[in-house]
């Protein structure tokens, strides 16, 4: 009988130790079959003492029943804890959850507009140049027929750059027009170019003004270029950018580097005209400044705000939206 009791104790211990380390449902099921199954070790034990005297048999029987119950409870709690951890960790995947979007960057709306405008002028036969953002006063103003102390300088609220050694009178360019001079100084006519670039002005910001913004400068120089050439080129450009039906109008305006000067507005909505650019015939003094004879050569120039073009095209009311880095705004232009 002692042997039987010891065997039972050992069996209980062994079973409890084994189940503790089991991790998979299959292993636990094998364990159950091995100990609690119809031909398992517990039933085997019951079989072994069925021929004993009743007294002994009763005692061993109740001991064996306790062990059996103990193992059954072990089995239950093990399967429960296994199911729970299964769900929390590895196997559970909620297919209804939204995915993680792949937020790739895109080209800024100002640059998109700039590219579109450059492509439009390129189709019309223009080359594309770029120029320095830090300019000398000579190119930003003097050579463009805007001498020092001339009241017209007030149009350009300039940000001056500290003099560096011999290099004096530098400005963050307030417009792209200085590139007209640089191009004419370095190229023989015929010239047909556009120059996109960033500009800076020392001024308070509001819905239509930023202290930095982008312009595209245009310049055409050849023999026999007249105002009609300018109008037709700029009309054609407006139709490419804003659509076939676009109406445009020219009105007199003043810029020291052109004569006559004009502003071109386009018909935005019914009865709403928005100024898109300044333009005009290159002033004879400017031609003289770069060594071109105004009796032989003539030409036209124009300058437009890129953000302004985008505002007209997309109905944006506040220029500051372009530089607020608001993702909701930017993602509309993906
Ligand atoms: N530079 C001018 C500005 O910043 C724009 C401009 C007007 C450019 C007339 C031109 C032009 O080339 O002919 O306001």
Image (cartoon, rainbow, N blue to C red):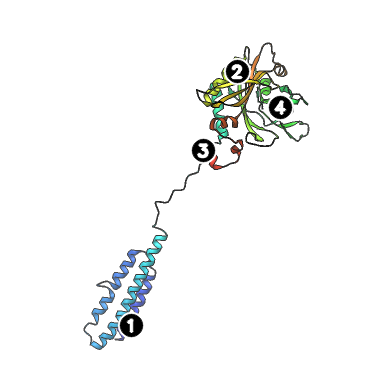
**Residue 311 falls in image quadrant:** top right
> In the shown orientation, is residue 138 left or right of residue 119?
right
Q: Determine which of the numbered discs, if any, sits on residue 140 in the image.
A: 4
* Mark 4: C-beta under 8 Å from nearest atom of ligand 1: no
Q: Residues within 10 Å of mark 2 (few under 14, many from 20)?
A: many
Q: Which mark is residue 49?
A: none
Q: Position of residue 259 (x, y in %)?
A: 68, 17
Residue occupying the point 26% across, 76% down: 43
**Extreme residue toward the front, this view:** 271
Seen in the picture, residue 84 relative to 233 is either above or below; the reply is below
Q: Report the mark closest to the observer, 3 or 1.
A: 3
- Residue at numbered disc 3: 332
Work out whether residue 61 or residue 158 is closer to the camera in this orientation and state it: 158
Q: CA distance from mark 4 to mark 2?
A: 23 Å
Mark 4 or 3: the one toward you: 3
Give the residue number, with chain letter if any, for mark 2. Answer: 230
Categorize mark 4 by other alpha carbons within 10 Å: few (<14), some (14-19), many (20+): many
Residue 96 at what x, y percent from top left?
40, 51
Q: Earlier in the sequence, mark 4 or mark 2?
A: 4
**Residue 118 in sight:** no
Quadrant for ligand 1 reads top right
**Mark earlier in primary sequence (1, 4):** 1
Q: Which quadrant: the N terminus?
A: bottom left
| Residue 6, numbered circle | 1
Tell which circle, 4 or 3, labels the residue nearer the N-terminal end: 4
- Residue at left 56%, top 20%? 235
Residue 291 place in picture, x, y as percent: 71, 16
Question: Could you give the CA–CA distance between mark 3 and mark 1, rounded to whole angstroms?
Answer: 80 Å
Left or right: where does residue 248 sit relative to residue 209?
left
Q: Is residue 82 visible?
A: yes
- Place of residue 203 in the rendered image (x, y in percent of width and height, measured from the top left): 70, 35
SS type, badge 3: helix
């Amino acid at each position: 009988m002692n042997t039987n009791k010891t065997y039972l104790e050992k069996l209980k211990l062994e079973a409890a130790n084994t189940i503790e380390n089991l991790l998979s449902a299959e292993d636990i099921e094998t364990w159950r079959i091995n100990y609690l199954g119809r031909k398992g070790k517990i039933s085997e034990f019951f079989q072994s003492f069925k021929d004993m005297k009743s007294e002994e048999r009763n005692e061993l029987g109740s001991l064996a029943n306790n062990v059996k119950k103990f193992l059954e409870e072990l089995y239950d709690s093990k399967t429960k804890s296994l199911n729970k951890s299964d769900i929390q960790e590895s196997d559970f995947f909620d297919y209804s959850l939204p995915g993680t979007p792949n937020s790739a960057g895109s080209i800024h709306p100002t640059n998109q507009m700039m590219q579109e405008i450059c492509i439009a002028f390129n189709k019309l036969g223009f080359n594309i140049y770029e120029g320095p953002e830090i300019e000398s006063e000579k190119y930003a103003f003097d050579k463009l027929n805007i001498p020092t102390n001339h009241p017209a300088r007030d149009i350009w609220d300039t940000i001056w750059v500290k003099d560096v050694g011999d290099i004096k009178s530098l400005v963050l360019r307030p417009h792209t027009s200085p590139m007209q001079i640089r191009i004419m100084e370095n190229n023989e006519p015929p010239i047909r170019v556009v120059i996109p670039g960033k500009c800076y002005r020392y001024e308070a910001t509001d819905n239509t003004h930023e202290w930095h913004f982008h312009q595209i400068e245009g310049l055409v120089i050849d023999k026999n270029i007249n105002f009609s050439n300018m109008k037709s080129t700029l009309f054609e450009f407006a139709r490419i950018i804003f659509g076939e039906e676009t109406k445009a109008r020219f009105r007199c305006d003043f810029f020291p580097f052109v004569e006559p000067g004009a502003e071109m507005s386009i018909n935005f909505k019914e009865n709403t005209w928005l100024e898109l650019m300044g333009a005009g015939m290159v002033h004879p003094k400017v031609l003289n400044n770069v060594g071109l004879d105004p009796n032989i050569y003539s030409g036209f120039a124009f300058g437009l705000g890129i953000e302004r073009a985008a505002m007209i095209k997309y109905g944006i009311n506040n220029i500051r939206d372009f530089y607020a880095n608001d993702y909701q705004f930017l993602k509309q232009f993906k």
